[in-house]
Each structure stands twice: as structure tokens, then as C-alpha cells.
Amino acid sequence: MTAPTEPLDVAVLGATGTVGQRFLALLEGHPWFRVRALVASPRSAGKRYADAVDWRLEGDVPDHAADLVVRSAEDAPDRDVTLALSGLDSSVAGTTETRWAEAGLFVVTNASAHRMDPDVPLVVPEVNADHMELARSQRFERGGAIVANPNCSTIGLVLALAPLHRAFGIEAVEVTTLQAASGAGYPGVASLDLLDNVVPFIRGEEDKLAEEPAKILGRLEGGAIEPAALRVSAQCFRVPVVDGHTASVSVKLATSATADDVLEAWRGHVPPRQGLPGETLRPLRYTAREDRPQPRLDRDAEAGMGVTLGRLRECPVLDWRFVALAHNTVRGAAGGALLVAEQAVLNGLCGRHAGRS
Ligand code: NAP
């Protein structure tokens, strides 16, 4: 397991979108990855990136991307790059990513299309980096592979659940999410639908939250994932917050635990330092302040890669309840996917030294 000696060439798919823009902001000056190709819809194809994109993040379009000419997702995959980071719209992500993997590329996707494929690792590096090995069993020609970043709400939830699952076992979870507007991409939900309002429906989201945690918290055995035996009941709401998904969570544990036990399990969740450029010292932090976490105040913890927990209380129905908050386009999308890609490189799955069968 070694860091690359020189940067790997990378394509960003869906480069003009909400997630794509985050990718490009985070990839500026990245020590392991160098952006060589940008891909979006035929509407953007043929234009300089700076002309094609409606840049919605602070500052200007990053210099490293501004003059690259955007290619169409309908074009043949770019075989000069090693890694494709995908923030493609869900309508085209699945088929496009398959084509890129078939062309021999290592694809890390933010879309849901491949997440539950039995041979696709669904990875939160601090939780289940070992699942990455599943990618070796994929049978794309030329050694390509697909690895998935989980749903943006799943990531914060699973980072909070993993230490509890390891210490006490989790039987059941009830989660209600309050999800930011940027989670719907740009322009997303019309302002007149969202201001002064809460929308109690996000298509497909409750199913993703119900099924993804069991796969991530499951065990890799005999070349397959044995899902964890936990049930998740999810309700998802769109709220007028720009960035940051909040989750109100209740859990039923398999063995009893005190509040101190729960806090100790979270505190003890300090993943080993591996030297990944995007790894955080403290992916989980607990705040004892009674009115936190809040999206505006806590979403940028650890440069957007930290999950903030708070309000641990006994639950009169299940065992314990708490609040978890994560930045949806950083930890929940581009930052999380970048960490997955870095882990894949370190594990020898992606890059010149990759040894997939
Ligand atoms: P978005 O802002 O709408 O961006 C979508 C991207 O896909 C744009 O680059 C767009 O290019 C491209 N695209 C759209 N239609 C296309 C087509 N027919 N052919 C090729 N490219 C096409 O969406 P987003 O929020 O960034 O989400 C991107 C993906 O990440 C989705 O699968 C989403 O579910 C997932 N995700 C999003 C978040 C989040 O917080 N936003 C979090 C986790 C996962 P043009 O600009 O050329 O149209």
C-alpha cells in the first residue's frame, strides 16, 4: 500500500454540476490527482469549461479547469486517464459509468445506479475500506471497475452508526432527514416551493437510506457482502437550507449501553492515519451544546468532511436518540468520493500498480 509517485490523470464526469464543481474545487492542487478531462451533457460539450459552467461556489472557476474543453458523455470514454470521478445526473450515470469501466477506467460514482450491485463496493473509507476488495471480482474488460460513494444522507448516518454497531450491535434505526436544497442539484427545487416551507418528499431517498446502511455495515465474506441485520425506517424532508443534511436518529441496540458508553464509542472512533490527502483527524465529533448541531454553524467542520453529532438522549421507544449533521456536497458527495478514490489508490486497486484480476 503506497502513495502514487506521480499524479494520476483524472476525468470528472458531470463536471458542470453541483457535485462536479465541488470535485474541481477540491482537486485544485491535489497531490495525487491531476484533472485531464471534463465531461458533461451535449449542451456543454465543445465549450471551454469556464464558459460552459455556471460556477456556484465561492471564488472563480479554478485555473486548472478553466481552459479544458468539455466533452460529451455520449463520446467514447477517455482512455488516457486512469480514474473517472462521476457526478453525472442520475438519468445517464449508470450507463455512462458502465461504458467508462468497460473501457478500463476505475470509476468512483456518486450516483445511485450501481450502489446496490452485488459486486460494487459501497464505501465510507473510515467504516468499510476492506469492502473495496470486492472490486477485484468485477469482470469489466481491460481491468476497469466501479466503486460507489453512498447516498449523501447515508454517509453521515453510517459514520454515526458504525461505532455503535461495532460496540453494541444495532437492531433498528429510525431516521428523519432534513435535507438541504443543494442536494437536489442546481437549480433544484424552485425557491417558491421551498422558501417558507418544508417538502416531505424526496424521490427515492427513503429507500436508499433504508437499504444502504446494511450493505456498508455488513461483512465481506467469501467474496460477497453479508449485509448487517439492521432495519432502517427513514423519512426524508427537503428544507430551506443551502448546504448540510441534518438527521434525527433513534437507535435500538442489541446490547444495552449507557450514555457514557455511547459517547465513548463515538470518541474512540479515530480511524488510523493512512496518509490519504483527504483524510480527517476527527471524522466524528460530538457537541454537548443543547442547540447543536446546526447546518450553518457545523457543516464546515473538518473542511466539510466532519460529521457533527449532538443531543444524545434516551429514547422512550427505542434506546437512544441523537442528531447528526454532514455537509452533503463535501462529505456526502465530492469530498467523500475523493476519499474513496484515494483509498482505492492506496489499496492498489487504481493506478499504474493496480493488480485487479
Ligand atoms: P446537477 O447539479 O444537476 O449536475 C448534473 C451533471 O450531469 C451536470 O454536469 C450536467 O451537465 C450532467 N448531465 C445532465 N444531464 C446529462 C445528460 N443527458 N448527459 C450527460 N450529462 C448530463 O446534479 P448534482 O447535484 O451535481 O448531482 C450529480 C449526481 O450526484 C446525481 O446522480 C446525484 O444523485 C448525486 N449526488 C448529489 C448530491 C448533492 O448533494 N447534490 C449528493 C450525493 C450524490 P450539463 O451542465 O451539461 O447539463
Image: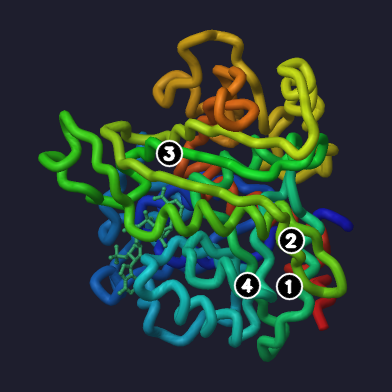
**Front residue of this view, candidates 206 and 267:** 206
Q: Which residue is mark 3?
A: 177
Q: Earlier in the sequence, mark 1 or mark 2?
A: 1
Q: What's under tag 2, amino acid-wise?
A: Ala
Q: Which residue is mark 2?
A: 344
Q: What's under tag 3, amino acid-wise?
A: Thr
User: Alpha-carbon neighbours of circle 4 within 10 Å: few (<14), some, or many (≥20)?
Assistant: many
**Front residue of this view, candidates 89 and 213:** 213
Tell me if 286 is positioned left or right of 4 in this view.
left
Marker disc for residue 135? 1
Q: What's under tag 4, amino acid-wise?
A: Ile
Q: What's under tag 1, amino acid-wise?
A: Ala
Q: Earlier in the sequence, mark 4 or mark 3?
A: 4
Q: Nearer the viewer, mark 4 or mark 3?
A: 3
Task: Label 2: state its secondary structure.
Answer: helix
Q: Are marks 4 and 1 in contact (CB under 8 Å)?
A: yes
Q: Earlier in the sequence, mark 2 or mark 3?
A: 3
Q: Are marks 4 and 3 in contact (CB under 8 Å)?
A: no
Q: Earlier in the sequence, mark 3 or mark 1?
A: 1
From this viewpoint, which residue is outermost toward the left?
192
Q: Are marks 3 and 1 in contact (CB under 8 Å)?
A: no
User: Alpha-carbon neighbours of circle 2 within 10 Å: few (<14), some, or many (≥20)?
Assistant: many
Q: Earlier in the sequence, mark 4 or mark 2?
A: 4
Q: Which residue is mark 4?
A: 146
Q: Position of residue 215 (x, y in %)?
A: 67, 60
- Quarter of the figure with the C terminus: bottom right
Colour scheme in the image? rainbow
From this viewpoint, which residue is outermost toward the front?
317
Answer yes or no: is residue 4 visible.
no
The residue lying at 37 percent from left, 47 percent from top is 183
